[in-house]
Amino acid sequence: MLFSTRLCLSKAMLGTAGILFRVRVSPIGVSSPHKSMSARIDLIIFAVGFSINPISNTATYGKPPASPAFDSAQIRIVMDPRDVQTAKDLITGPNAPEFLELYNEPDFSFGGWTPITSPEESARTLQDLINTPTRTKFISPAPAYTYSSWLSDFFARCAGCLDKIPIIGVHVYSPDAQKAIDQIVAVHNSYPTKKLWITELSPASSTEQGCALDQNGMISWMQTVTKFAAATGYVDKIFWNCGEFVSGFFSRPSIVSAHNFPSR
């Protein structure tokens, strides 16, 4: 299983959707939350977050051009229907990516930057993309609410799509480690033949979710949930959300401190 971090950008950059890129670092042994993890987990670093565009696209990210190696390692996201044509051009082009994630939390609008997209509209706008001949493997839309019927409703309306999507995207949030595990199990039970990518994992994504874990509580939570996921055989990748330091918004789940040193 691959354990990763998912880095976020400012809200002003979220309107153009999602990026994840990966760089392999092994073996494990970076900081105390990771030292007790199974040696079967590699540390993968994912960065920048939320666009179909490459990380070297300075118009999107407002940063100097990145190394082409980052672009080639990046896992892009079709954030919403606005990205579908760009995605089709991408997967039919000469450099079609290995993976492409479809629709990030279509049942939730983050700060108004992303539209809520119904299962019916999602099926209508993604059907042609999913049916396009390509080497690219699709990751399913990842609803914000694990126990909602959004994903099953989507597959019911998108003819043949379940057969063409080998990976189910999952977002898992709960300050209670067992409840987080229960979410993972519930999604697996709904799609027992599919691999799961937990494309967002954390005890909480906002202060409203009641997370009051201190540093040791966060480490214990990580150890419990990631060890479970590693042992399942069906969780293929985990994206910790988020990797960079965020003050006052998350329940201190960041992998690095305010000065970009590893959290301990």
Image: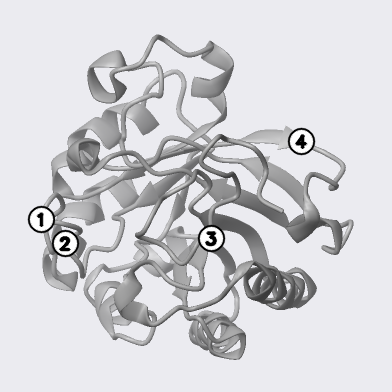
The numbered mark at residue 149 is: none
The numbered mark at residue 25 is: 4
Q: Are marks 1 and 3 in contact (CB under 8 Å)?
A: no
The amino acid beneath tag 1 is: Gly
How much space separates mark 4 and mark 3, taking CA atoms? 20 Å
How much space separates mark 2 and mark 1, taking CA atoms? 5 Å
Callout 4: 10 Å neighbours few (<14), some, many (20+)?
few
Q: Camera-side residue: 211 or 147?
A: 211
Identify the residue shown where x is 72% and y is 78%. 224
Q: Are marks 4 and 2 in contact (CB under 8 Å)?
A: no
Q: Which residue is mark 3?
A: 253
Q: Secondary structure at mark 3?
A: loop
Residue 233 appears in which quarter of the rendering?
A: bottom right
The amino acid beneath tag 2 is: Ser
Residue 30 appears in which quarter of the rendering?
A: top right
Residue 38, position in %: x, y?
86, 63
Q: Which residue is mark 2?
A: 109
